[in-house]
Amino acid sequence: MPNKRYCWSPGTWPWQARLPSGGLAFAVSCLVALILAVSGDASARPLDEVRASGELRVVVYDDNAPFSWTDASGVVQGVDADLARALAGELGVKANLIARYAGEEVDDDLRSNIWQGPRTGGLVGDVMMHVPMERAFIARNPLVAISNAYYHEKIVLAVQTDAAVPTEPRSMLQPFRAAKLAVQFATVAHYYAMFADDGVYKANINPYLKFETAVAAFRSRENMGLLGRRAQIEAALKGSDGFKLVEPAFDTELRMAWTVGMAVKENSRDTGYAVGNALNALVDRGEVAKIFERHGLTHVPPPVP
Amino acid sequence: MKTWKWLATASALALTVTISEPAFADVSIDDVVNDAKTTADVVSNGLGPQGQRFSPLKTINASNVANLVPAWAMSLGGEKMRGQETQPLVKDGVMYITGSYSRAWAIDTKTGKELWQYDARLPEGILPCCDVINRGGALINDKFIFGTLDAKLVALDAKTGKVVWSKKIDEFKDGFSYTAAPLIVPSKAHGPLIINGVSGGEFGIVGRIEARKVDDGEVVWSRPTIEGHMGMLNGKESTMTGKKNESWPGDLWQTGGGATWLGGTYDPDTKLIFMGTGNPAPWNSHMRPGDNKWSCSRLAIDPETGEIKWGFQTTPNDGWDFDGVNEVVSFDLNGTKAAATADRNGFFYILNRENGKFINAYPFVNKISWAKGIDKNGRPIYIPENRPGDPTKGADGKKGTSVFAVPSFLGGKNWMPIAYSPDTKLFYIPSNEWGMDIWNEPITYKKGAAYLGAGFNIKPVFDDHIGSLKAIDPATGETKWEYKNTAPLWGGVMTTAGGLVFFGTPEGDLKAMDAATGKQLWAFNTGSGIVGSPITWDQDGEQYVSVVSGWGGAVPLWGGEVAKTVAHLNQGGMVWTFKLPKQLAQK
């Protein structure tokens, strides 16, 4: 019996439940999931086709380190790539990894990678990795089913070791009334820093178009802090000392933390259920945490609903 | 017997084709500069570098246009049926067009026979934001030059369609592409130059205008559009655009936007290039108090050096995504060297093209909600409550105040070019009457991570139409006539000395209207929507009209209520050429 925590179905998180009782919705959808998995519902690229073809087509982002990127020899690397390989292994098939560039928004990527295919030609995937799980986002993409949460992304703060940072999480940005803070341009971190606490940090925010440039401008001590996604910061600074990570509390309704999951086509849900079971098995065996560790990251599991 | 007859006919036909095989003459820079006056060819985007889209031809006129019939049609073939936004070029019996998916063709203008086809090999997984269109090429010397969706400029041998050179404008992996028709301009210092901008690009890139040599595509100068950035000339730094931080807070000028995605026009009289610039970054205008120059502007540039001679900003501190990229058309306004431009923001601006001084501005759509008008200096008189709110100040904190803004971000006018008739002294503006709910959205996702965005929902302003072609007097702003169209207009306009205005509709009609009254005199349905621009030329004493048909572009990519007016339209890809039957042409 799969670990209930990862029982696959959209609408199972309390904050996206449409039935009066989130608990009831959760139980019913788990039951439906089980029945569908057993009966093997026929659909676009359902599980039996995946198994028959001997491969699971998984789309990952290109140029999205540390989660996925194509290395110099053309091999797709990263957490998402390794996780996809492990998931395919659990299903007894090979992973066919397709690395694609990102469109303007993830909604466009779902169209290109899952339910329609790229406008310029190419295959759709059975599964797409690194899809955010958020109620409004899921609701506006009804042609895909999004679930199989595997990571919780959060905006954190890296500072130079010698920087004095208040221990109170809500006050951790206070030093940037005077010191410089690096952010990636137009990210939620940038936005928050510009406006937090009535804009007192505004003059000290240095936005960089590329995250790598922001990291370089932090390493060089041009900036005392770097505010951004935990995974990116951990990966960029792994193995180096002279900095520490802290978790500020953000006083905002902006999305400063979100859960990362996967998408399958709406009519190929059974593939999603099977991947969900495989994910649970890998989590239980500690394999997922090992994959994150291998890339210098902490595996932060999605919050338990 | 029957077979024999058929063979005889076929070989006679083949013989005819061989005899009239086109000449493939070179296109000189004088041909380009004088294009508006020469009726036998069309060698520039805009039927002349000033972009008036006016032809002195009058063989086809208001009294006989009703008799116009197809001369030939050619399919662009393949499965690649998507928006055809090109404007054909014609030189010595050969038509050159570009098509969706970065393709190009040379066609015999007499028969419609394909002479060559070029298909750019596009990398897998390119993600052009706004359909896979192309807006046309340029002819100079022995080359046909156009841009590709993977952000390259390609020069083909006009005779064979073989690649002479191919230059990367920018990195497609960072979201760059190229869809505009390159502009050809003369220069004393460098000879003829190819002028290109940049399309697309990661949010926060800085727009620029480049001049390249015809022979090898090497960059001669480059001019960034956002103040604080350095220009280049002959491989060295030249001058800074504007003054750093003059109209931008902090370091935001470094990621200021201002993409130059629609190409430009050239005025041989003042020897200036006119180019428009896109919206500033980031979306949320509350993050960048100030005018944010030169985003949402028109720039006049010296082709010799790439220096900015003047700039005029249509939407300072843009908060509605009113790109300022629309074309600048040079014309004579009662002896003043003027230029006109119909902006996304719904106002039709008349400027002095020698110095960029503001002359006047008139609304060219029926409703404008974001500004009360334009003051005597050319600045919008904003209506502050109709600026999308700051999400951090929103009542629910989840999104900023939503406002209904008219026009929508697709503009009172989008990319589709206007036309000017020196005969009627009227501008013909293909416009759209639509608005949008717009709010600043703190939760949009890019590459799986939370980013900032803006939410849009486009809505028609009227129940019965969105598209509106208006004839407007640039001296008074008076609308002389209006044609209303159910679906949004998305193709260019042409006017002729025959007293006619030609334009296409998404419903598929190529229409001819009386230039003075707006009365419809002729229409022909091409079988798919028209989003390209018509041309006309004469050959062996006959006047031809051509347009490329094929529905697509940005409109079908947007949902909401607008989608209802276009959902039933079919894809296509066909060049249509029309003429008068000989016996009727004399009338």
Image (cartoon, coloured by chain):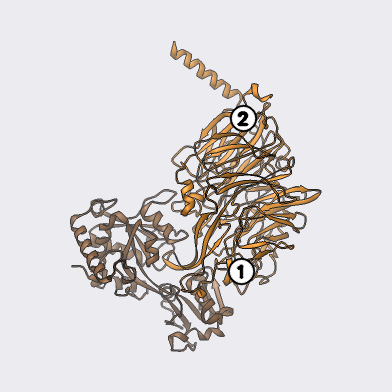
- Left or right of A41, for residue B488: right
- Left or right of A54, for residue B507: right
Q: 10 Å neighbourhood of mark 1: few (<14), some, or many (≥20)?
A: few
Q: Where is residue B293 in the image (x, y as percent from the top left)?
A: 66, 65
Q: Which chain does tag 1 point to?
A: B
**Residue type for callout 1:** Pro
Task: Give the colour in which the image draws chain A.
Answer: brown
Q: Where is residue A258 in the image (x, y as percent from the top left)?
A: 39, 71
The chain letter corresponding to orange is B
Which sits in the foreground, B8 or B166? B8
**Quarter of the image where one finds residue A129:** bottom left
Vertical placement of B374 versus A22: above or below? above
Which element type, helix, strand or loop, lies under badge 2?
helix
Which sits in the foreground, B458 or B101? B458
**Quarter of the image where one finds residue B235:** bottom right
Q: Position of residue B482 (x, y in %)?
A: 63, 45
Residue pushed farthest right? B335
Residue B154 visible to an observer of this rendering: no
Which element type, helix, strand or loop, lies under badge 1?
helix
Question: Residue B66 shows which numbered tag?
Answer: 2
